[in-house]
Image: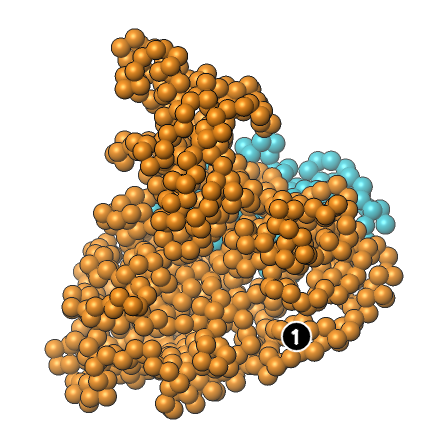
Amino acid sequence: MAYTLNVNGKSVSVDVPGDMPLLWVLRDVLHLYGTKYGCGVGQCGACTVHIRGRAAKACQVPVQNATAAPIVTIEGLSADGSHPVQKAWEELDVPQCGYCQAGQIMSAAALLATTPKPTDAEIDTAMNGNICRCGTYLRIRDGIKRASGQPVNMTTGRGE
Amino acid sequence: MSTASVSVNRRSFLKVSAAAGGGLMVALYTDAFADLLAQGRQGGAPAAPLTPDAFITISPDGIATITGKNPEIGQGIKTALPMLIAEELDIDWKDVRVVQGDVSQVKFGGQSAGGSTAIPGNYTPMRQIGAAARAQLVAAAAAQWSVPEAELTTAAGKVMHAASKRTIGYGQLAAKAATMPAPALASVTLKDPKNFTIVGKNKVGVDVHKIVTGQALFGMDMNLPGMKFAVYEKCPVFGGTVVSANTEEIKALPGITACFVVAPGPSLANGVAIVADTWWTANQARTKLKIQWNEGTTATNSTMGFDRSALEFSKKAPQTVTRNDGDHGVAMKEAAKTVDAAYQYPFLVHAQLEPMNCTAAFKDGKMEMWATSQTPQQGLSLAATACGIAPTDITMHLMRMGGGFGRRLANDYIAESAVIAKNVPGVPVQLRWTREDDMRSDVYHRAAGWHFLSGGVDASGKITAWRDHFVTVGKGTMPSGSATLGMNEFPARFVPNFSIVQSINESGIPTGPMRAPGSNALAFVMQSFIDELAHAAGKDPVAFRVALLDSTPLPIPQTQGPGGGGGGGGFNAARAKGVVELVAAKSGWGKRTLPKGTGMGIAFHFSHSGYFAEVAEVTVDAQKRVKVNKVWVVGDIGRQIVNPSNANNQAEGCVVDGLGQAMGLEITIDGGKVVQKNFNQYPLIRMKDAPTTIQVDYLLSDNNPTGIGEPAMPPSIPALCNAIFAATGERVRSLPLIKHGFSWA
Ligand code: FES
Ligand code: FES
């Protein structure tokens, strides 16, 4: 069945089963590989994208429910990695393996869109759906603070 | 970048790139390099020839493309090894591009990620490669200007002649330099580390920009024209085999390309493969699979059964004696205070965030693969064996990996992928596991273990007696992989009446290395029980450990392996004491008044050549909710930290990993199957529960640089448990903490 999606500002048509999760449509049909698969059950957040500007887990959204709203993936967050969250992530050398980081960045960007200067508690709540198995949480927190113009905990050196 | 086959000295260390013209390649004297690799500490560095010009290509614009040879699993080696080359090449880091090397022992020598060996094994060889290339550039400039090499200096990608005020960029010299005689690696002059401009400085990971912009990098991101997808169903009981399967019915479903039974082989479990146009179709078809399994003998295994029989073993004479010094029985009678304690830790899975996957294309007898693996050369051999072709008929590309933690030391999924691709010749296929596949068929687990301890201290507060009846999993009298307790594991040799005895729970559950194998569990037991004895003796936990390290140890007999801690050379008490004392100072141990419900715990451990001591400060409320306020880490991993930003990231990650395991992680077995199916039943630590401050310091010692990805992890668990004891008076003797009513605050 054909569905029309709005992904990263472009209208695209896909011919797939309606219950196919958006995650696999993005990756396997549209070849947007930035959005990752970690669990498929809404637990890890590796598949986080923006739907109507809000963070959503693409593995939990059947494609048939994703036709009406604009979808933004990590590839569409900025043209060149210039989103403040992406820049902060680079400056602070946040990733280890990097597999979770697109999802982390999408959750963080959605948070900052509504809460320009989040508190630690607000960060905790917004990021609770994203697992980093490598344990880069301290840097993720710092990245969000850097991106929102708040002081960063540099007890232990990071970035250049 | 296309590389022109400019005919240069075959041994040149430099290659000329045609992207913009000529490049320079440094040639290695292969024998010398093999020797150096062989000298690299244990494992992963087989003596092998390599291709001289495989590492550095310089293009006319002065950009050096450096190959990172080792698998990148998040440990930062794709940045660190090229940093070592670039340092001695004497080029600006901003003029360096890093590419991942394909899988080739001939080109690169050993390529592996495991045992924290990459830095100790490659620190000198990578520098020598860079220095050899530099020497060829200098020689080229000397020839061009007709001046003695001794009058030339280099910096930031240029050769300079001060007397004549001439300067020339590496890019302009590359083509000529590649034809210069390659120096012997052992003879090249290395920089004095005080002149380092790259090594020892914070460098952002070379793939970070690609990661934050979502570019395809990882194994699962591989895409080929006409690629199909495969799933592979195995028996949920370990070692189970296929009796029959409805493959014909599955084949008839729409979108299905193939469905077949794969015969078992080395590192290849019997199962049923489905290949389809899309992965979603293949995975949906699994719901229609009807397989009759022969579950085999492991079906009788269960965590409850193991626990029960471990307790029975503890009441009986052990099966074997690992070590016996002095007379434990007499010492216990003479002790001023004694403690008996039963410790236990569960099975764990690796849970790296990217599930297993591999892409393969088989055509005209040749296989091309895009793999993730911590031991890719072994993966290539295994794939060859699994499909009965020669290793030389396989080309394997190495992809970035979404975590390793030891899981990718095994290559079972590569064997599966190769066999599946061979069954559909001409069609590229990506094998992709689900998280559920990954969790239920981790090819090996961190082994569960049981330790029945009895220890005593004398009136002066010294440990005089220690006995550990270690019950592990295995077959007969052989422990399973990474399920051993070595005879020299600390505090062996430091306690006069000391014994380790062992019994084995008969088990078919596969076990093997997970980050800091052995150590990740043993540090919890040893450092917690030392804490118990310190408390019994009425001594401060730091002073008690220092006194223990100050006592004269029994020697390690020549015939025995290295002293405890996951291999990596003998245990050095002075280095252990150094990190304990420094972490005590850094954390203000004993100098700060803590509120009620807040406590500090210390632990240290030696593994993978690294010495780490850690202090955790925690607050525990009346509902047993735990908040980790801060963790201090001090490590002694030699005289040089190659990339501090990355080392700090590893240390922080190690602590977070340890805290998460301790609080919530457990794999249980029932009917020979893993009970937990996905992350909702395997609660990895989340951001709100991680400490917001981890202070990492290094004790630079005059020892060769060693790795950090593993040794920083083990002490974090006992540091946490000892802090919980200090805060609450409750001693934690089994993991995870949630079983004792604890939770994160
Ligand atoms: S893959 Fe969607 S939450 Fe894990
Ligand atoms: S960086 Fe590896 S999972 Fe987050």
Between residue B199 and residue B626, name the one nearer to us.
Answer: B199
Subunit of label 1: B
Answer yes or no: is residue A140 visible. Answer: no
User: B104 left or right of B463?
Assistant: right
Q: Which quadrant of the rendered structure holds the N terminus of chain B?
A: top right
Position of residue B303 measured from the top left corner of the image (x, y, whole percent): 52, 80
Chain B shown in which color? orange
User: B378 left or right of B158?
Assistant: right
Residue where numbered disc 1 is placed: B240
Q: Residue at x 32, y 56 (%)?
A: B609
Between residue A84 and residue B26, name the one nearer to us.
Answer: B26
Position of residue B115 measured from the top left corner of the image (x, y, whole percent): 42, 56
What amino acid does circle 1 point to? Gly
User: A47 left or right of B69?
Assistant: right
Relative to B740, say whether B423 is above or below.
above
Mark 1 Cβ inside 8 Å of ligand 1: no
Q: Residue at x 42, y 88 (%)?
A: B313
Q: Which chain is cyan?
A: A
Give the colouring mode of the picture: by chain
Position of residue B87 measured from the top left corner of the image (x, y, whole percent): 36, 32
Between residue B383 and residue B166, name the one nearer to us.
Answer: B383
Q: Residue at x 54, y 59 (%)?
A: B410
Please count the marks in the image.
Answer: 1
Give the class, few, some or many, for how many residues have Cα within 10 Å of label 1's Cα (few <14, many ≥20).
Answer: many
Q: Residue at x 41, y 25 (%)?
A: B181
Quadrant position of residue B679: bottom right
| SS state under label 1 | loop
Position of residue B323 measured from the top left corner of the image (x, y, whole percent): 30, 77
Quadrant position of residue B387: bottom right
Answer yes or no: is residue B79 visible. Answer: yes
**Residue at the outermost left position:** B460
